Image (cartoon, helix red, strand yellow):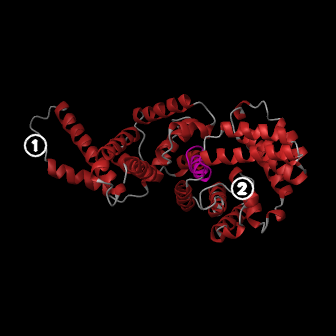
């Protein structure tokens, strides 16, 4: 294996294992910032040793062991310093071996789901909503600062500052590493749901990189969503998010070609959609209806996803209902992104000219200034109106803004198709 191959493998292992690593360490050292530093130390050790010694059979366990040893050393030093500061000259000598065993037991003790504890800790009310999401995506999703900035549509330095301040705040306030109970848990639930969905979305359509999707993030988000649903089985929005993720994830196998090229929704082979995930999602939607919570943001988005899931072929899609559901969503959760999606639904239900009018109304929206899907949608609608030169220009602009290599290539292909159609006209 060449050095670049090993570095790609280390990057992949880090993407998969970093969240569990940080969560396990955070339970041990009670400081998420320190836990991230210890995990990073283990990563550095891997970068030094694996190219020479080869990748271990269980790289995740190797990283955890390396990080655990550093954590134990940290805690031992801290205890020794505390003892010296207390000037307990007659304290029995520190028993290193017993201490190590005690600390290892602390780390290995099965006291629940560390990842869930980490999410609730990172979503503590002392942090702003933006900081909670950014920190959790960094710690749980393994996203880079740049990727989080793209997800939030804000500059990268802003995200970097949010993460640094959030970790400092958690340490200064000595926030406990735990899943809260009762009212406190309910207060943090909205942020937790938001973060889990952001992680899912990053897996469903990666903001950058060479792969169109990162299925491992979708799986992790769904796992966390199912744990939450077990904790709060009567909470409609928890079920709504779970239903939304299950139905969307049912399409993962159909979203790319064998070589990883994106396949858009109208062109997907629906026989490849996962029927089990669809059934699970629809069953969760039924439960939401019985609980009387069908009008929440996640329940509405799940209902939109269900419209696609129920259509055996694209022509059977109930676009009028989807447009109405987006209107309902916009009324309770106003957002230019929701309006853009509503424009697509209106275009499908009533024609591209009506959708284009709604898209053009968003042209000066600051949050969408560098959002590649705005010119992408506009290009699609212009293409359907046979305005091929304008459509080509929009697809080229969308490609210039896209950070995902697969998506950028798709947009460039669509621009080329418009140029060809214009020449043939």
Extent of the magenta region: 195-212
Quadrant for the N terminus in the image: bottom left
Which is nearer the eye, 124 or 407? 407
The residue identified by callout 2 is 264
Residue 351 screen position, x and y as percent:
90, 50
Give the number of the disc on residue 93: 1
Q: Which of the two residues, 137 or 28, is positioned nearer the viewer here? A: 137
How many C-alpha atoms fall within 10 Å of the one at disc 1: few (<14), some, or many (≥20)?
few
Q: Is residue 209 magenta?
A: yes
Whole-percent x, y for residue 193 in the image: 59, 50
Please give the name of the residue rendered at 83% of the width and 36% of the height, measured from the top-left corner: 360
**Left or right: where does residue 86 sit relative to residue 350?**
left
User: Does residue 191 show up?
Assistant: yes
Front-most of 191 and 419?
Answer: 419
Q: Is residue 335 visible?
A: no
Q: 196 or 93, which is in the foreground?
A: 196
């Amino acid at each position: 294996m060449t050095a670049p191959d090993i570095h790609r493998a280390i990057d992949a292992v880090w993407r998969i294992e970093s969240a569990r690593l940080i969560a396990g360490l955070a339970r041990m050292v009670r400081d998420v910032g320190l836990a991230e530093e210890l995990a990073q130390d283990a990563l550095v050790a891997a970068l030094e040793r694996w190219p020479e010694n080869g990748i271990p059979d269980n790289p995740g366990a190797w990283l955890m062991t390396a990080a655990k040893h550093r954590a134990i050393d940290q805690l031992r030093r801290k205890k020794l310093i505390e003892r010296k500061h207390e000037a307990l000259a007659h304290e029995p000598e520190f028993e290193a071996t017993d201490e190590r065993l005690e600390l290892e037991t602390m780390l290995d003790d099965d006291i629940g789901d560390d990842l869930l504890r980490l999410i609730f800790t990172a979503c503590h009310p002392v942090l702003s909503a933006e900081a909670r999401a950014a920190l959790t995506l960094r710690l749980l999703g393994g996203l880079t600062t740049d990727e989080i900035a793209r997800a939030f549509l804000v500059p990268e330095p802003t995200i970097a500052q949010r993460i640094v301040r959030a970790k400092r705040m958690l340490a200064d306030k000595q926030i406990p590493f735990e899943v809260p109970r009762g009212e406190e848990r309910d207060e943090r639930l909205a942020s937790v749901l938001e973060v889990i969905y952001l992680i899912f979305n990053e897996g469903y359509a990666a903001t950058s990189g060479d792969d169109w999707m990162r299925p491992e993030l979708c799986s992790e988000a769904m796992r966390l969503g199912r744990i939450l649903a077990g904790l709060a089985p009567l909470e409609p929005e928890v079920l709504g998010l779970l239903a939304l993720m299950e139905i969307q994830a049912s399409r993962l196998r159909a979203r790319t070609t064998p070589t990883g090229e994106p396949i858009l929704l109208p062109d997907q082979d629906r026989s490849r959609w996962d029927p089990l995930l669809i059934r699970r999602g629809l069953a969760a939607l039924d439960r939401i209806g019985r609980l009387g919570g069908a009008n929440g943001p996640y329940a509405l988005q799940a209902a939109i996803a269900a419209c696609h899931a129920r259509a055996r072929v694209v022509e059977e899609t109930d676009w009028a209902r989807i447009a109405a559901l987006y209107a309902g969503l916009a009324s309770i959760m106003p957002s230019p992104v929701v309006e853009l999606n509503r424009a697509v639904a209106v275009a499908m239900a009533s024609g591209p000219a009506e959708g284009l009018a709604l898209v053009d109304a968003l042209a000066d929206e600051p949050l969408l200034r560098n959002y590649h899907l705005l010119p992408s949608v506009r290009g699609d609608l212009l293409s359907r109106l046979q305005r091929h030169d304008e459509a080509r220009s929009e697809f080229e602009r969308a490609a210039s803004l896209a950070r995902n290599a697969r998506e950028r290539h798709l947009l460039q292909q669509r621009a080329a198709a418009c140029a060809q159609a214009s020449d043939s006209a």
